[in-house]
Image (cartoon, helix red, strand yellow):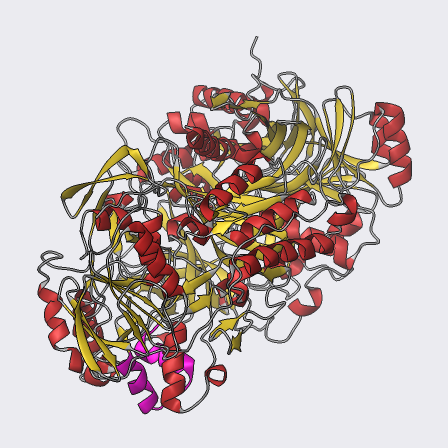
Amino acid sequence: MRLEGEGLINRGRKVSFRFDGHSYEGFEGDTLASALLANGVKLVARSFKYHRPRGILTAGSEEPNALVTVGTGGSQDPNVRATVQEIYDGLEAVSQNRWPSLDFDVMAVNDLGAPFLGAGFYYKTFMWPKVFWEKLYEPVIRRAAGLGAISGDPVTDKYERGFAHCDVLVIGSGPTGLMAALTAAEAGADVILAEEDSTLGGRLLSESGEIDGVPARDWAAAMAERLAEMGNVRIMTRTSVTGAYDGGTYGALERVAHHRPLAKGLAKECFWKIAAKRTVLAVGALERPIAFQNNDRPGVMMASAVRAYVNRWNVAPGQKIVLFGNNDSIHDVAADLLAAGVHIAALVDSRADATCQLDVPFYAGAQIVGTEGRKALEAVSISRASGVEKVAADCLGMSGGWNPTLHLTCHMNGRPEWNEAIAAFVPKVGMVPGLIAAGACNGAFSTAACLGEGVGAAQAACDALGLQAKAPKRAPEMPSAEDRPYSIAPLWAVAGKGRAWLDFQNDVTVKDVKQAAAENFRSVEHMKRYTTQGMATDQGKNSNVQALAVLADATGRGIPETGTTTYRPPFTPVAVAAMAAGAADKGFAPERFTTSHRLTVAANAPLIEAGLWYRPSYFPKAGETTWRQSCDREVGYVREAVGICDVSTLGKIDIKGRDAGAFLDLLYTNMFSTLKVGRVRYGLMLREDGHVMDDGTTARLADDHFVMTTTTAAAGEVMKHMEFVSQGLRPDLDVRFASVTEQWAQFAVAGPQARDLLNGLLDSPIDGESWPFMACGDVKILGVDGRLFRISFSGEHAYEVAVPARYGESLFQLLRARAEAMGGGAYGMEALNVLRIEKGFITHAEIHGRVTAFDIGMQGMMSKKKDFIGKGAAARPGLVEDDREMLVGLKPVGAVKQLLAGAHLYNDAAEPTRPNNQGYLTSVGYSPTLGSYLGLGFLKGGRARHGGIVQMVDHVRGVSTRCEVCHPVFLDPEGERSRD
Amino acid sequence: MTELKAVSPAAGLLPLSIGGVTLREDEMRPLTLIAPYKGQEAALAKALSAAHGLSWPAAGATSANGAARLVWFGRNAAILVGVQAAAKLAKHAALTDQSDAWSCVVLEGAGARDVLARLTPVDLRDGAFPLGATARTEVFHMACSITRLEAESWQIMGFRSMAKTLVHDLKTAMEGVAARAL
């Protein structure tokens, strides 16, 4: 029911929303929880395990009960706390974990089985037969229990990530945080003030006290305005700081668009990484429930929540309210309720010596021992020395005291200490480096103490940053505020029969914790896991301390001795979509496109990914129905006429300096310092462990200038390796290198007519004498400075021509057109692969990280005259044995002609089983040139087995093929085609 | 006569203007990576000063003189932007032409810093990143160079091949920042 009064709602602006299909109205400024209460809706959820009717317990982010689902399909958010969800026109929320409806939930039958469903029930009951757990029990249990569900559809909403930096991060904007932010800002610090709520003020928004003679809420509003006007203060509302990490970094989740309809381009949430030099934690305290029989009925809530609904949202959560507590705060709540004209049916204080000045039915030294009413609270039973009295009530506000919200201080594995005076854990100094806890989260509960600690913490932070000397400012004059001592007599669980809830969200009762203790789960961490207390989405914010207190009692230990469980990030739930913001699907990694990409796409070439690059698989022609037809045709271009292929993706590294040759001698197994200017050499590079790292050609353009090519896949790895060698192993060498992969667009021009084609474009034509095989040098192509290399990855007379990337698209277009006019054309990766298999050229399919130079038959390239990386390791016994798996060629010789990469090799007559394995295939392709499938692979002692017969068996695809072992070079073994 | 046509890295993708922030492709200027040889730092600094009126930049800094700008570009390296490197420098440093290797875009406008804060972990506050400051850092998943040209103008250099992703990521961030203002 809505009350008169000046809350923080805008009565001039009505908002309509829907919950479970019904339309309701609220006001701007309402949360879903306050608006539902204003509409008299008390039943909002069903509990996790027993499907008990549940109402709203709190008014903050710690809410365990009132979880709803907002949105549908790709925009569906489960487990949204109704206490955090602000209403807006068109908001549609539905309840969770009920069937067929919230009001009539069939699964509530679980509640009747409660005596059997306590802690450990699953573990004990569903032991046998073993296979039934995964197949039957678990799915059934999971269906019966749970909270909200995701839709299963891909996320359609946008999420963001962001980075923020500051000198002082102030977390929380209650009296402590506001003073801390102002103090730090006035000292000249860059301040970020992060507040979970939509408005600054913290608990001041919900309480009726005064600061500096004005209503506390007005003081907070004035402070907020003052801070907003300061250029060095950044206020981040709706932002929960979720974790404290190394080096003063904090994770924070900003709810950007949960309170309004999503607009185009707008992110729903932004996950911030905040780097702060110092941090003031001012996040207040959370009121804790008291466990008593049936304390989970809709209408039972935290006393502070009752106060917040009345003061902030002008909503009376009931007509007959009972307050129950063990500390002074329920008296403050009662006073506020009376002032608002809300009827108080009883004020129950468990402290025998408590007194009350208010005109309400007062029960000192009394406890609530039970409640009645299924879907809404109807009555409570009050027990005192004189007996049990039943009092009609539709709302019960409880307060078991306050727990400082110290979660963040524990995120780096610090443990808090027990403070007997306030019966709560408080943080120790220095648990998170650079973070100072102040105010209620540090155990200081009076408003005056909070204001003071806020100033003190900010001053300490500024001192540490050397800020006060730079901008000496007097400390803000301390505003006056209440400074009453906090009085509490611990009460965790009211004795008695029946179920008394500790963890509302995971349905854990006092009995469950006692059961855990009885079964010797004495460690608080074991109790937690056995009962699941604290393991729901609220991470036990409402139950941890009470549960460990009950455990302490049950095991006969003290609370400090029992200790807390580990507090871990995130403080409030963070959607995975927020952490992955922008990185889903193609956003996972950058896409790299060659300069010929647009023309490739226009030619309808299917693309394949090579690392981050996209390369054409083949260029289909009209009438071709399979990729093999295209591939065979493109192979023919190169063997018969001329083919064009974009090879820009290969790594290109310019190496300069007078020691460049010596540097290359160390990197490569073979010699490069002796390479003549204007010549190219093939090189092999090993890792320190003697295995092959990469291969490629390196050209010498000048005495002190080489350009190395790497494979596409290993370009980054080779660059990293070179940095390591240069910085770590041979810093004495005068050599500098830079990646020029992106600078040059490079194209293979391959085939018998390659030179003719090029001569049509080069400013100075070339011939066999000036440009023999493995020549290189600077050229001009249509007036543009380029580089030309006579190298071949196809075995044909071929070149690679490079121009600055801006000309890449244009040159590709021209080369392709010229090639087409000569009976050739562009070729893709499939043809490139066939061409190189025909020639036995290796790629990373062969040099996959576990092979040596010896294995691929390149032992002769390991220079005996010089040292090189991997030399010693490559000579180790075992790496040069005759029975190692060695590179061989394979040709089908039986009825089955198919070869498959990944298939294994076995001796001809042997059974194809693992112990008989003789090797495997790494590359296969159909050679139109030779009219046969060809394969490259590794075979035990393969070099001595040419001419022999093995069987290839692909167990996965069910193919067996008899093969002849041969030399890996199938075509033109003398290499005559590549020469003139 | 047949000739090769030049295409800029972000051709067809830019300019963009969203909510007061604009993203445009910088004109293709000469870019030369300069890495001093061993013990040549002082001689190089002298030659730079004589040839271009530039000083060797400290880590995270730039040096500018008219159209020429020398931008710190990582360990023991800087990139000369805007003018052809004088041939004399080659005696003291490895000079590598990078004019086509980088996609150079300029992000500017009142919300430009907020846009960048969606993508890079660098501290962009005035005190930490004043005019002329530069960083080799990440722009979302890409290794980039960011230089502050003016109060609300930043040069971003990314790999040429990744220009499309760079523009996409910046555009997404621009839309997010702009949508908040509505």
Q: As drawn, is A943 to the left or to the right of A205?
A: right
Residue A899 visible in the picture: no
Magenta segment's dominant SS is: helix
* Image spot of residue A319 (x, y percent): 20, 56
The residue located at (29%, 51%) in the rendering is A82
Q: Nearer the viewer, residue A964 or A74?
A: A74
On-image quarter of the C terminus of chain A: top right
Write down the region rendered in magenta.
Answer: A510-533
Position of residue A25 relative to residue A34, above or below, is above
Q: Position of residue B39 (x, y in %)?
A: 89, 45
Is A474 on the left or on the right of A643, as rendered? right
In the rendered image, the vertical position of residue A143 relative to residue B33, given as above or below:
below
- The answer to which image quadrant residue A300 occupies is bottom left
Residue A516 inside the magenta-drawn segment: yes
Extreme residue toward the top, this view? B1
Residue under the point 13% across and 57% down:
A102
Q: Is residue A633 magenta?
A: no
Residue nearer the viewer, A226 or A355? A355
The picture places residue A363, in percent across and down from the top left corner, at 29, 73
Q: How many numbered circles does the render carry?
A: 0
From the top left corner, tell me how far across and down residue A457 is, in percent.
Answer: 63, 57
Q: Is residue A34 visible?
A: yes
A96 and A65: which one is in front?
Answer: A65
Identify the image quadrant of residue A13: top left
